[in-house]
Amino acid sequence: MQIRSGITMKASLKAMQEVIMPAIDPENSMALEQAQMIIGLLTLLNDRRDLQTAYDIDALRRCITLGTELLAYDNKEQLRADISAAQSAIEGASAIETTLTQHIAILNSHISTIADQLCAKSDEESSAARRLILKVSAEQNIRERSWLLMQGWEPQPENIPDISALLFDIPTKGEAYD
């Protein structure tokens, strides 16, 4: 049995297209729809497989950038330590994918806690931090929509940049938060 995901994914996709789809009764619209959905998902996973680690590294870098900016509003020592650990993970960045996603989850947890605290305040500093968080959230939304673009859900796909153009394009402090 082949354990390499690329070969397994291609074999599964080929089996769906060449064996299973033709075997489905054309009158069974629900089965045809589900099989087409599976083919679409397998195609997406296969096409994005080589970008997955780059996507995770990019997401982690964005969390580091936002977390570092939020230290100005809530200078938590644990957040600072977790940012440092995340940076180390990127530096050894043929990093194992689970390590990247663990660091993303840790930093997102800190960011969520700070965001919740900031929402309870109404001063100008908190307002600026909320705008920062909303800007980063909008950027993440575009990245995720771009990641899934080939699924055909976007009403105007021409307005969504290709995912490869968005990875590692992390604005500097002056660019990102104007």
Image (tube, grey):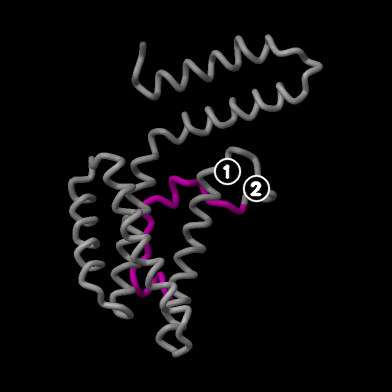
Image point (47%, 15%), residue name: 11
> Percent position (x, y) of residue 113?
38, 69
Specify the label residue 51 is tagged with: none
Image point (47%, 81%), residue name: 120
Mark 1 → mark 2, Cα distance in angstroms: 7 Å
Image point (23%, 42%), residue name: 95
The quadrant of the picture occupied by the C terminus is bottom left
The disc, 1 or 2, on the residue closer to the chain's N-terminal end is: 1
Give the vertical position of 175 relative to 164 (above or below): below
Specify the label residue 149 is tagged with: 1
Q: Is the Cβ of the residue at disc 1 closer than 8 Å to that at disc 2?
A: yes
Residue 70, by quadrant, is: bottom left
Q: Is residue 66 left or right of residue 35?
A: left
Please give the residue where the numbered disc 2 appears in the rendered image. 154
The quadrant of the picture occupied by the N terminus is top left
Give the vertical position of 60 relative to 130 (above or below): above
For disc 2, the neighbor class at 10 Å (few under 14, some 14 to 19, many from 20) is some
Write the start and end of the magenta stretch as one range: 159-178
Report the amino acid beneath label 2. Answer: Glu
